[in-house]
């Protein structure tokens, strides 16, 4: 029986790249807000199963999670980046970012803990360079990623049978990155950023590491040009 991997935010960008890396060796549950947004990646992997829910809709997530009794890999990739200065960010923007990037991750993990324990599973948290250092204009996003790093550390300590890897990539060439660069008023140059496939390979390598190794943190930066 092949191992099962659930990837959130799998409809495009990095999530879709992770799905492509794990597909040869894993049965996939592909998560996204809607089934429609999963259509392109499901066309590539028709044997994969859609796992569509808004991750902050906790009753819906609980209903879906109840159908999983064993899970070998959980990749928390979904997230939001609502940027702005401390002077301009509203309380609702702070709440939305922390809800999506931290609370939803914690709740999905909690709901899936029995399935993860049954498989002595691997949990991968797609964090960010912002989870290691906060820059101007990134306060709420960085705060959520610092919190996500703390969540990973605590999960690793509380669940010693699980492997928990926090991956901290620099900026990645994705649609979200294009939106961020446009918001910053700069011209987009994809060569400045990591390729999604590069980060996805780091996910696969962490998952495939022998059981005597526990890859706790992986930091990736774009090559200086």
Image (tube, helix red, strand yellow):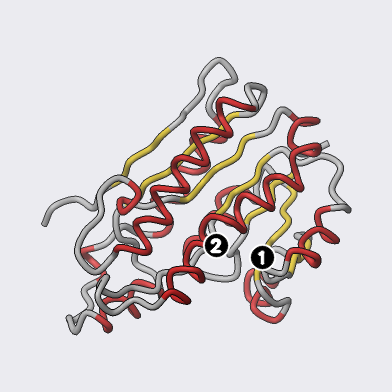
Percent x, y for residue 102? 53, 55
Circles 2, 1 touching at the beta carbon (< 8 Å): yes
In which quadrant will I find the N terminus? top right
Residue at the farthest top position: 212
Q: Disc 2 or disc 1, which is closer to the eye?
A: 1
Percent x, y for residue 170? 29, 54
**Is 153 located above or below residue 6 in the figure?**
above
Residue plotted at (55% across, 64% down): 100
In which quadrant will I find the C terminus? bottom left
Residue plotted at (86% across, 42% down): 69
Q: Is mark 1 on a helix, strand or loop?
A: loop
Left/right placement of residue 143 relative to residue 126 reads left
**Is 109 located above or below residue 158 in the figure?**
below
| Structural distance between the alpha carbons of marks 2 and 1 | 9 Å
**Is 70 located above or below residue 16 in the figure?**
above
Q: In which quarter of the image is residue 172?
A: bottom left
Percent x, y for residue 31? 68, 63
Percent x, y for residue 143? 37, 55
Q: What element carries label 2?
A: loop
Left/right placement of residue 114 relative to residue 120 reads right
As rendered, which of 55 and 41 lies closer to the eye?
Answer: 55
Assess disc 1: are there few (<14), some (14-19) or many (≥20) residues with their C-alpha within 10 Å of its C-alpha. Answer: many
The residue at which mark 1 appears reads as: 55
The residue at which mark 2 appears reads as: 78
Assess disc 2: are there few (<14), some (14-19) or many (≥20) residues with their C-alpha within 10 Å of its C-alpha. Answer: many
**Is 215 located above or below residue 51 in the figure?**
above
Q: Quadrant of residue 219?
A: top left
| First in residue order: circle 2 vs circle 1 | 1
């Amino acid at each position: 029986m092949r191992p099962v991997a659930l990837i959130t935010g799998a409809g495009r960008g990095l999530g879709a790249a992770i799905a492509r890396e794990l597909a040869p060796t894993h049965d996939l549950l592909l998560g996204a807000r809607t089934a429609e947004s999963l259509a392109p990646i499901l066309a590539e992997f028709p044997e994969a199963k859609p796992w569509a829910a808004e991750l902050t809709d906790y009753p819906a997530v609980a209903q879906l999670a109840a159908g999983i009794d064993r899970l070998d890999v959980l990749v928390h990739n979904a997230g939001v980046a609502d940027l702005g200065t401390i002077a301009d960010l509203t309380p609702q923007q702070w709440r939305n970012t922390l809800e999506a990037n931290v609370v939803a991750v914690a709740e999905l993990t909690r709901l899936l803990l029995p399935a993860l324990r049954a498989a002595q599973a691997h949990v991968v948290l797609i964090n960010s360079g912002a989870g290691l250092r906060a820059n101007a204009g990134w306060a709420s996003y960085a705060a959520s990623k610092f919190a996500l790093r703390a969540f990973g550390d605590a999960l690793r300590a509380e669940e010693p049978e699980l492997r928990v890897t926090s991956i901290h990539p620099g900026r990645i060439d994705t649609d979200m990155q294009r939106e961020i660069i446009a918001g910053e008023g700069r011209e987009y140059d994809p060569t400045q950023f990591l390729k999604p496939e590069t980060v996805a390979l780091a996910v696969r390598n962490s998952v495939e590491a022998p059981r005597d190794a526990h890859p706790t943190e992986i930091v990736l930066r774009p090559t200086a040009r």
